[in-house]
Amino acid sequence: MGGEPQDPQSGRPAPAAHRTLAEQLRSWPDARLDRLLHHRLDLATPAPHDSAHLASRATTRASLSRALDQLTRLELYVTDALVIAVETSFSELSQIVHAETDAVRAAVDRLVDLAVVWEGPRGLRPLAGVAESLTGGLDAGVSGIRPLALGLTVAEARTRIDSLSPAARALLDHVDSQGGTGATGSARSSGVGRVDDATTPVEELLAHGLLVPENTVIQGLVHIPGTAGLALRGGHTTRARVDGPSQLAVTPRPVALVDKTAAGAAFEAVRRVELLLDHWGTAPPLVLRNGGLGVRELKAAAAHLHLDEASASVLVDVAWTAGLLAQGADGEGDAVWVPTDAFDLWSASSTAERWWDLASAWWGSPRTPALAGTPAAGGGRLNALSPDLASNFQVESRRMALTELSGLSEQSGLSEPLGQTQALASGTGVGSLVARIGWLRPRRPRTRRDQVAASINEAELLGVVGLGALSTHGRMLVAGDEAAAVAALVPQLPAPVDQVLLQADLTAVAPGPLESALARTLHLVADVESRGGATVYRFSAGSVRRAFDAGWSAAEVHEFIASISRTPIPQPLSYLVDDVSRTFGTLRVGQAEAFLRADDEAALTALLHDPKAAPLGLRRIAPTVLITSTPVDVLLSRLRDLGAAPVVEAVDGTVRVARPDLLRARSPRGRRAPGQQLARETAQVSAAVSAVRSGDRAAAAPVLVRTQPTSPSSALAVLREAAETRRAVLIGYVDNHGATSERVVDPQRVEGGQLTAHDHRSDDTRTFAIHRITVVRLLDPTP
């Protein structure tokens, strides 16, 4: 009984032979073509005309390089072997690759699915540009990635290797261990004919054909030809057997504990972003000329949030990515970083919803805020929010890291604390994750290492990961399910409280997380002393003065403290507010360059003789008046640093204390959510598949009727016939810009000088002007 030809080694059906890659693509079902375009999305934009156009685009160096970046180490080894063998059967290929046959088969299937390899008449073969794109793509120890050279067979190469001198053999082994490429130095790299003429090991290898010159403009570079590399490694492309990726180093983690830990971090991330942006709404930092955030401003933000600078940089960057922060202008027209209009709406949402906005923005962000403070390519240091912090591979590194964590059981997580990720040894949890992803994506080993480690630290800071394990709501983030993520996070979040416990030592203890508005207001009147299960706030003369500087009165401070206290107000706190109120405004600052005036002559005398006030250049011109050359805005901050509580005096002698205006920037254009981006890509791929199929049908279908109308009436007859008989036609159409294109359409209605038809290329119904149709071809009704 007949059947498909079988592969003698695997027993599976042998691949179909195609003369060209275009033929192979044309033979694929839509589902397989759809899979190719999803993995190589650059091929779908703009939509290819047909399979030949798609095949041509797939062979470009840039597209091939992007495809090779998606391959695992084993898939790259298989590609390497195919480059060396040029065109071979699967049976021969499985003998060359030092790996399990089933693993090689799976690798070949993926390479064919990615159109990196195609099934030629004599076997599997890589695309023409693969060899060039592979060079230098793997680390040392990988085969030379060179095709057959000089007609040298493996047996001949083995014989020549056995005849080498010890020095030449040692040199050949050394070049092979360094990736198969080397430099000749002062030795000749050309013009070496016979072995007897060789005077150095390099020349001996060149004479034997075991090293051949590189075909580049750089002189002195040589490489080991593919067959010689196979002979060196016992007929394989690698010396050692190629195993799969290493397993992650994990340890048991209770799900409930992971979720609680991650939920606490998520709550803190949301609260800190809110506090920082609320603060920047009245005191925004300047935008650097390169578009970033200054070092001093980042340090101030970190101190304000009680975080290290690296963590503060991550939160600032995530807020910007989520559209909550943007560049705006202050009252003097300077460019500053301020919250957007979207921040006010975001602040009114629930904590879980706000966390989703931050986490989903981070999930799809190409930015690497962990690089802030590292050396920049052009000199200097990279600043937070700098445009140079984006990386083409960051999104993939982040998603691969968390996807690997999602593959672990719910009761396990990475073995070592995440705070120790600087030690990335392969035996540690994060180190094993770095090693595993390095095997899955070996083309960018250096950047992957840092990006994976940074992704885990960022995930911990944002509450996606807890104790080295992916939380339940983190798994929902990876799955792109917003409703499930919010539902999973809500019961894990601590219940907010609306009161504090005041104590006689001028502290207030919040027994739980404060309500958002209350926390922001209390942060103005008191300083955070410690965080944890209960947050401790401390009232001081400086913190109370800060409220007065914002326009509060003593009565408003007393009223606010009384409204939030669950306990009676301690007498020392009332005295503190009253004392600050009495001294507030005693010293008045005006323009001279600036002057200081006070009713208390002794207070001015003490200030004048204070050693710390010497840089202000104060000079007495009257018992109650001092003048200085220091500008008013600088003078006010310096006096407050000295413990004074100055206020600005207007021209008429009245005191000016006003609440600062809230600054807002226009919200940036909405960024696509992960689900929206996926839907857009799916629609884009679907349109590309339709366009390819339409073009293939137009090229392959036999022409039954062809008319080149000299007038619209001659086209109308064919189009009406097609509409009546439900036949497809190929039309030549001239658009409004004078461009001519061919389209396969199904005519539905012809009237009023217009053709209404379903366009196969765009997969929608369109209207065409009859007078713009230049050619009509009635096609075979067979689909």
Image: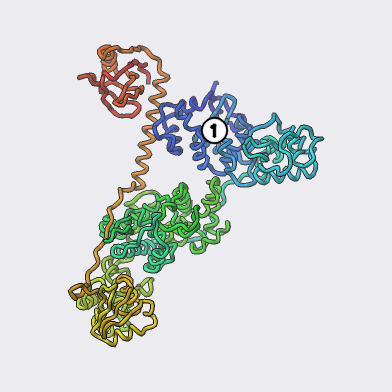
Whether residue 718 is visible here, answered yes or no, is yes
Three-letter amino acid code at the position of disc 1:
Val
Q: For this view, does 10 lie left or right of residue 278? A: right
Q: Nearer the viewer, residue 184 or 646?
A: 646
As drawn, 353 above or below 514: above
Task: Measuring from the top left, give residue 324's x and y in whole percent.
Answer: 31, 56
The quarter of the rendered structure image containing the C terminus is top left
In which quarter of the view is residue 589 placed?
bottom left
Q: Nearer the viewer, residue 549 or 699?
A: 549
Task: Measuring from the top left, give residue 176's x and y in whole percent.
Answer: 68, 43
Q: Nearer the viewer, residue 709 or 184?
A: 184
Disc 1 marks which residue?
117
Packing grade of label 1 (10 A; few <14, some 14-19, many >=20) is many
Q: Secondary structure at mark 1?
A: strand
The residue under the point 30% across, 25% down is 735
As drawn, 147 above or below 244: above
In which quarter of the view is residue 144 placed?
top right
Whether residue 583 is visible here, answered yes or no, is no
The quarter of the rendered structure image containing the N terminus is top right
Task: Measuring from the top left, give residue 691's x and y in whole percent.
Answer: 38, 28
The residue under the point 36% across, 32% down is 687
Residue extending farthest right? 196
As drawn, 532 above or below 146: below
Could you tell me how many numbered marks the image carries?
Answer: 1
The residue under the point 57% across, 30% down is 124
As drawn, 285 above or below 567: above
Q: For this view, does 333 lie left or right of residue 139? A: left
